[in-house]
Amino acid sequence: MSDAFLNPDHPSVVFACRGVRVFVKDGDTEKQIVRGVDLTVRRGEKHALMGPNGSGKSTLAAALMGHPSYRVEGDIWLNGERIDTLEPHERARRGLFLSFQYPVAVPGVTVANFLRASLAARRGTEIPVRAFRQELNAAFETMSIDPSFITRYLNDGFSGGEKKKLEILQMLLLKPAFSLLDETDSGLDIDALKIVSDGINLASGPDNGLLLVTHYQRILNHVQPDVVHVFMNGHLVRTGGMELVTALEERGYDWLAEEAAIPEGSRA
Amino acid sequence: MAETSTSVIASARPALDEALLKAVAATLGGDAAQVSRRLEALARYETAADPDRVRHLWRFTNPASLLPASVAGAAASGPVPAPAAPVAGASVTIDLWPGRAPAVQTAEDLPVGALTFTAADEPFPSGKALASDLFGALGDAAWNAGVGLKVADGAKLAGPIHVRIHASAAASLPRLRLEVGRNAEAMLVEQHIGGGPDVCVVGRTVISAADGARVRHAVVQVWEPGTSGHLAVETRAGADADILTVCGVFGGDDTKLELGTDLAGAGAHSEIIGVALVAGKQHADVHTSHRHLAAHTSSRIDYKAVAGQQARSTYTGLIRIEDRATHCEAYQENRNLLLSSRARADAIPELEIHNQEVSCSHGATIAPVDPEQLFYLGSRGLSPHESMGLVVRGFLENTLARLPDDARAMVESFTAPRLATIREGTA
């Protein structure tokens, strides 16, 4: 189980945050979306984050990655190091990864050129073309993506499923210490869900961790999280195991809102 | 300010007179016919109207900033510069310095008779109208470096005609003339280099492609900072002629490039592919015009500009289709990418269509780099500058992909250093 009392720089902790609040500009004022989140993920752990639409799950994931639209308060730790003042690319080079719910297209930039550049950035060294090709071909096979995608423009004209598979392919190649997976299961058919889940499991090991943001039980049946959090109204309102997922499938979110004394109208 | 732009331009016109033009002609060894052509151009220069700042062509760029203060003293002094090694693969490499005869280096495999030299300002047999605009008349009258070339009917040159045009005088007025015979094939690379503070270039290139000719023409401008200049290219395409014009605008401070192609013969086709990469306080103005004078002619323009820092890109483009030019196809696209909040771009496409039996379309966009693209690339470890470099390369990609391999490699040899400065954050 996650242990909120463990120090965020403890060697067994891969990722932690303390008192994270996220604000967005709202006209001349600011609106608070995330109202104080504490999270501790130990090496080898898989966490799931569930919550109703509009509760701020995606905002939390993007803010932890360092999205420039958000102002973030609180501490974020990766491998015992504070990363909350770092730029997104500096967080990525240290091993943080975000699988996007809606991956952005970059027309004119081939998947191969993009992956080679990001691998070089993550590893801090250029990868010889031949070695890169071999690694790339193996990853494409693992993720059941047609090799013709290697020379296509990044996410340009890709279907939803193709984009999500490419996100997990990047997770496999970049070998992040900690991955934020934002609704990686949305828009996937049954076969693609299996491929994506297998990829996530393959990328998971005893030294790294992940936080999987999702609405649905089905991906959790494949990925089997160690810890499940429920996120509502900008807070983690409940933490448990897979039994919590079953309870949510049966009863929805309202009972948790009542327990957490969240007023109706603020339960998103 | 009550000051009118007209008076500013009028006072910026460099003074020309008969003695001056005779001296320039003499320096270049011009004959009596050339002197009389220059004097005839002087008359046109003196009566040329000031560029109209109200119309699109000159709305965004002050013509006064592109005129040399004086064209006197352009005659060369000092030792003859040694030309650099010939360009690999070129059939002919020509270096042009103001006030000097052209330095020509010919490849050994150039077939005898395929290429001959003419006066740089010799009129074409097709009798193209003489320039009546201010810059055109100035160039006709006072050009101080030039070469004329004629590719024989049916000849096919193995390599390009590569002309290095050095902006080495305060007033550099180069002139190129290329006449491509019937069913002949030629590639002309016009590379504008050199320049520096207070150097001003007024260049003029005229190309005539006879019926069935295939001409590829590249204009690449990589002047040093401080240079200003106006380059005009006028091309006439005969029946079934096929013209590809590639332009690359990278250097100088205030610059304007005008590319005009007349599709004069039935079935002629012209394509203009251009890129500009500017930063600092550069102002790059590009104007294209495709004039469809004959039926069944087609044209296409794909011009992309990237402006960083406080730079400004201006594009105006005209497609004109005459009433007799039926069954024409014309397409024009201009896209601009802004790398900073202080960079700006203007895009004015214009269509003038005088008959109903045409297919014609155009599109223009001006947009900053999408911050979501930068965040996505950042989340994969790429720094903001690296991400910007990748996005810019992607932006140019589908335009560069339209080029033949050799032309693409040539253009990329100029874009690569500019992209490197974007990746390194120095532009």
Image (spheres, rainbow, N blue to C red):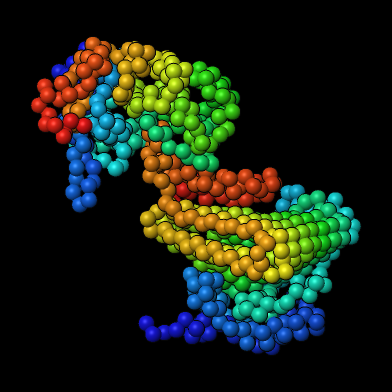
Q: Is residue B275 above or below residue B208?
A: above
Residue visible at 52% across and 27% down in the picture: A127
**Image quadrant for the N terminus of chain B?**
bottom left
The image quadrant that residue B319 belongs to is bottom right
How many tags in the picture?
0
Rendering coords of residue B212 (x, y %)? 82, 58
Along the viewing direction, whichever of A14 and B109 lies nearer the viewer: A14
Rendering coords of residue A257 (x, y %)? 15, 25
Residue visible at 16% across and 34% down in the picture: A266
Residue A36 visible to an observer of this rendering: yes
Q: Say whether residue B340 is left or right of residue B63.
A: left
Q: Is residue A43 above or below residue A88?
A: above
Rendering coords of residue B398 (x, y %)? 58, 45
Q: Is residue B121 above or below residue B187?
A: below
The image quadrant that residue B119 belongs to is bottom right
The image quadrant that residue B209 belongs to is bottom right
Q: Is residue B222 above or below residue B376?
A: below
Rendering coords of residue A169 (x, y %)? 46, 23
Q: Say whether residue A255 is left or right of residue B97.
A: left
Residue visible at 37% across and 39% down in the picture: B375
Work out which residue is located at the far left of the displayed protein and give it: A261
Residue B282 visible to an observer of this rendering: no
Work out which residue is located at the far right of the displayed protein and give it: B112
Residue visible at 9% across and 26% down in the picture: A261
Q: Say whether residue A43 is left or right of residue A18.
A: right
